[in-house]
Image (spheres, helix red, strand yellow):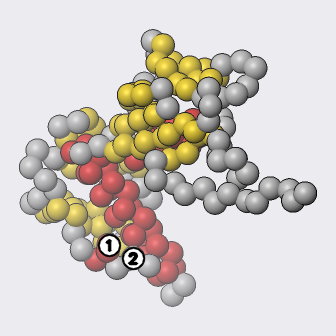
Amino acid sequence: MSRLAKKPIVLPQGVTVEIKDNVVKVKGPKGELSQEFLPYVKIEVEGNEVWVRPNENQIIRKSDWRKIKMFQGTYWSLIRNMVVGVTEGYKKELEIVGIGYRAQLQGNTVVMNLGYAHPVVYEIPSDVKIEVPAPNRIVVSGIDKQRVGQVAAEIRAFRPPNVYTGKGIRYVGEVVRQKEGKKA
């Protein structure tokens, strides 16, 4: 049960929220996002604030209240993430660790040499922007938090960090605890 959902989501300048038929659309300077929601909550726009309130018409028995409060917190977070996405955007940075491991952009794909016998080619989705500022660094950015995280996780999955050597693709700032190798 969320305590944050008791507060309104304050809309920055230039952001509009539109609610129609259980769909919330958020428009801002960086783009537009939409999210479908279940009828357990009522989403209301009052001035420059968005309120997510429980829909008390959906309460049939006392045990439904807990489920409705969970949905209230979930949808509050989703809408807040949409507002932040269309104003500031989201960014995940990955670093490639290992001798000979590198990445480069080629058109609409990222080509990575990760120690396999063949290069790994990743097709860049249309709703996400990928930059390679250095051969050992990949920056994934976009307006949808879930999509940016998913693309970064897909790239990381090609060669996750090895717990013995530390080689692989990791998030910037991620700490990989290395295990001790075999003892002689």
Task: State whether residue 33 is above or below residue 3.
Answer: above
Q: Kindly give the residue lying farthest to the bottom in the view shown.
A: 62
Residue receiving disc 1: 5
Q: Position of residue 170 (x, y in %)?
A: 55, 45
Number of numbered labels in the structure image? 2
Q: CA distance from mark 2 to mark 1?
A: 6 Å
Farthest residue to the top: give it. Answer: 107
* Side (left or right) of 57 relative to 45: right
Q: Secondary structure at mark 1?
A: helix
Residue at image location 37% in from the left, 52% down from the top: 22
Please give the name of the residue rendered at 37% of the width and 37% of the height, measured from the top-left corner: 141
Q: Position of residue 30 (x, y in %)?
A: 23, 36
Specify whether residue 16 is in view: yes
Q: Quadrant of residue 154?
A: top right
How many residues crowd around disc 1 within 10 Å: few (fewer than 14), some, or many (20 or more)?
many
- Report if the CB atoms under discs 2 and 1 are less than 8 Å apart: yes
Image quadrant in which you'd find residue 7: bottom left
The circle on residue 2 is 2
